[in-house]
Amino acid sequence: MPIDRLEQTNYYLKQKIFQHLPQSTRKATAIPGLMLSRYDNDNSQEKCFYRPMIALVVQGFKRSVVNNEAFNYGKNQFMVVSVDLPGSYHITGATSAEPFISISIKLDNHIISQLLTEMPIKPTTFKQKSASQISVSEVSQPILECFLRLVDLLDEPENIQIIAPMVIKELHYYLLCSPVGESLRLANSSGSKINQISTAIDWLRNNFAKPLDIEQLAKFVNMSSSTFHRHFRQVTTFSPLQFQKQLRLYEAERLMLVEGKDVKTVAFQVGYESPSQFSREYKRQFGEAPHRDMLKKRS
């Protein structure tokens, strides 16, 4: 009986990830943007902020909710997010004997834009209204092999700087050729409404602590204020101000959880005028006051 090549590659990838994750954890790697995840138990639904990324399930099952839409995907399936969006996820069916295993990497808009100038794809081959900012698809052999080669590189740190960027570019190429390529092309095609909103989101991500002038941001992406508001909500389901608040709160959570900063310092750092206002909005978002939430998450 012939060996299924996709299954064989999945098996090798799973074994390599097990070597790096002998227990339940999420781990950033030496390759920028590459994350490995292992869950030995189901988790309650957790809120998160998705960056442009591809997340591949190697073993198990995951349910993500983004823009009020649920996406269910399991072994040898992946989810692509083409713009920054808040959401949540839920791991189900994970056990210590058969843990949930996944691998993800941030997408690089510069690589996608460069590839679009090199690939024989005309803008007229897709319709603006047909592409979603979130897509789920079956993994192809070339994409799976790119992930395996990236994980293999973790054992060859001296080669990462040279080889990893080439494999990552190759991965982006195969994604653009895949069924999810339409949404990635649209989000990175100059002049499209989604690309204009994506540009605004990039600005917000890099300047979320600053006061927000909607008219100036609309002009920055060559839109009227009313058109900008309408398309921003269509893409993200949030107003620009609500989206800025999401960015501030998720960055605050990261600063406290990862960098161990105190509530008062974080409140001012992410742009709030008072720690009490920050604490109220943090509790409204995460269900607990900042200090209590940190104790819970660290445990």
Image: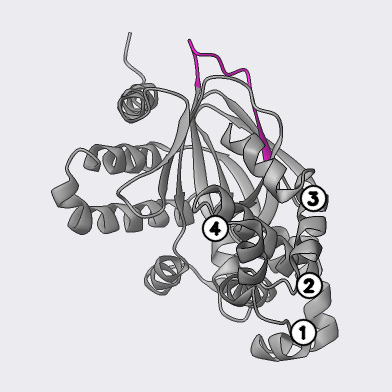
Percent coordinates x, y for residue 235 in the rendering = 74, 64
CB of mark 2 within 8 Å of CB of mark 1? yes
- Report which residue position mark 1 lands on: 214
Name the kind of residue labelled 3 in the image: Lys
Q: Give the range drawn in magenta.
A: 89-99
Q: Quadrant of the C terminus?
A: top right
Indicate which label's residue lies in the foreground, 1 or 3. Answer: 3
- Report which residue position mark 4 lands on: 52
Mark 4 or mark 1, which has the lower sequence index? Answer: 4
Q: Is mark 4 on a helix, strand or loop?
A: loop
- Report which residue position mark 2 lands on: 241
Name the kind of residue labelled 2 in the image: Leu
- Report which residue position mark 3 lands on: 283
Task: Classify 219 as above or below 36.
Answer: below
Q: Residue 141 carries which label?
A: none
Q: How crowded is mark 2: few (under 14 residues within 10 Å), some or many (20 or more)?
A: some
